[in-house]
Image (cartoon, grey):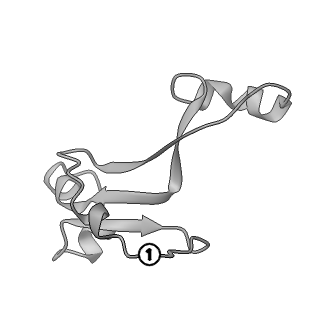
Amino acid sequence: MLPKLLPHLDKIIYSDVDVVFCEDLPEVDHIDIGNHWIAGVKGTFNLNGSKRLKKMRHRLLNDQRYLCSGFLIMNLKALREQNVYRT
């Protein structure tokens, strides 16, 4: 819904409410993500010893990597142009 709710913006930062910003983020606004819908921080973790995480293994990209969804850059322009959202 964000592409529709914010038609005047091409790109936004999405952040979880429990994230604290200690400095300004001017560099983030200049990151070029091309036509990708979202960009974020790649996270990794060790699956050794965790039965719960081992069960999730099939959902992870390349076995042990995932996108930390607490801080994302969203390309609203690309989402609109590629009709990714429903109206």
Which one is in front, 21 or 53?
21
Relative height, residue 42 to residue 10 (above, below): above
| Percent of width and height locating residue 82 | 18, 48
Relative height, residue 67 to residue 28 (above, below): above
Q: Quadrant of the C terminus?
A: bottom left
- At horizontal 71% and vertical 30% (from top left) the residue drawn is 46
Which one is in front, 15 or 24?
24
- At horizontal 61% and vertical 27% (from top left) the residue drawn is 64
Which one is in front, 62 or 19?
19
Q: Quadrant of the N terminus?
A: bottom left
Which one is in front, 54 or 79?
54
Left/right of residue 39 with respect to residue 58 in the rendered view: left
Residue 87 seen by the camera:
no
Residue 49 seen by the camera:
yes
Q: Secondary structure at mark 1?
A: loop
| Percent of width and height locating residue 17 | 57, 74
| Res 5 quadrant in image | bottom left
Q: Identify residue for label 1.
A: 23
| Res 74 quadrant in image | bottom left
Left/right of residue 42 with respect to residue 73 in the rendered view: right
| Percent of width and height locating residue 7 | 18, 74
Q: How many marks?
A: 1
Amino acid marked by disc 1: Glu
- At horizontal 66% and vertical 26% (from top left) the residue drawn is 57
- At horizontal 51% and vertical 76% (from top left) the residue drawn is 22
| Percent of width and height locating residue 63 | 59, 23
Work out which residue is located at the far front of the displayed protein and give it: 23
Relative height, residue 4 to residue 40 (above, below): below
Left/right of residue 35 with respect to residue 14 in the rendered view: left
